[in-house]
Image (spheres, grey):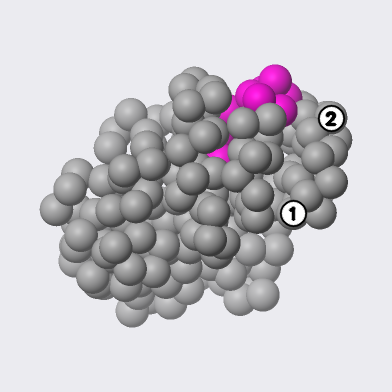
Amino acid sequence: MTDVLSRLHQIRVVPVIVIDDPDHAAPLAVALAEGGLPCAEVTFRTAGAAESLRRMVDARPDVLVGAGTVLTPQQVDEARAAGAAFVVSPGFNPAVVDHCLSHDMPVYPGVCTPTEIEMAFGRGLRVVKFFPAEPMGGLPLLKAIAAPYGEMRFMPTGGITRESLGSYLGFDRVVACGGSWMAPPAWIRARQFDAVREEAARTVAAVRALGAGA
């Protein structure tokens, strides 16, 4: 679990991926890696999600691939079998969290209130997803609800763009941000993997620029 968290903190941005066709998975993994962003959260919103995840892992074992939008323990098992390195859920689902913990699977459930943070804290979790970040109030709300929970760290996701990325990553309680701007579904369906590679590189450059300005 610590290794996954360390890599997420190093990468700083998690591409949130929706794949309809598993045939797109391998070239997508290559494009992200070549763009300098060796990470992906494959959302379990499509029938081929597990197979897509498996193909990304097979094509580029160096890419940190997790499963997102995981709603049931059964999907946790599918993600584990496909080679997922971590699990993300949109909300705090006790059945999903407990199943992950019982199998030593890193899990980052979604929270957007103090009550949900305390539910995660009570399970021993110290990193959670803040979702949906921008619609819920963005960084001001995150800072407000994070204040009482000094041990908790966050992965904001939802409505974040390359332009707003810096403000979130500038908050020392943020591990990484999730976003779909570097690989939107339309680009994936159209096999615009060069565009994915280029936007991944721009995103990495933006993150590096933040470090240079610190």
Looking at the image, residue 40 sits to the left or right of residue 110; the answer is right
Amino acid type, label 2: Asp
Q: Classify 10 Å Cα crowding around label 2: few (below 14), some (14-19), many (20 and above).
A: some
The image shows residue 148 at horizontal and vertical percentages of 36, 66
- The residue beneath circle 2 is 194
Q: Are marks 1 and 2 in contact (CB under 8 Å)?
A: no
Circle on res. 54:
none
Is residue 211 inside the magenta stretch?
Answer: no
Looking at the image, residue 190 sits to the left or right of residue 94; the answer is right
Q: Nearer the viewer, residue 123 or 19?
A: 19
Q: Nearer the viewer, residue 179 or 185?
A: 185
- The residue beneath circle 1 is 185
- In the current view of this chain or complex, which residue is farthest to the left? 102
The image shows residue 104 at horizontal and vertical percentages of 19, 44
Q: Give the quarter of the figure containing the N terminus.
A: top left
The image shows residue 61 at horizontal and vertical percentages of 47, 22
Mark closer to the chain start, 1 or 2: 1
Q: Nearer the viewer, residue 60 or 93?
A: 60
Q: Number of callouts in the render?
A: 2
Is residue 35 inside the magenta stretch?
Answer: yes
Name the residue at 84% across, 38% down: 192
Q: What segment carries the magenta color?
A: 30-41
Secondary structure under tag 1 reads: helix
Above or below, comparing residue 82 to residue 108 in the picture: above
Q: Classify 10 Å Cα crowding around label 1: few (below 14), some (14-19), many (20 and above).
A: some
Residue 18 visible in the picture = yes
Name the residue at 33% across, 79% down: 115
Looking at the image, residue 58 sits to the left or right of residue 17; the answer is left
Secondary structure under tag 2 reads: helix
Q: CA distance from mark 1 to mark 2?
A: 14 Å
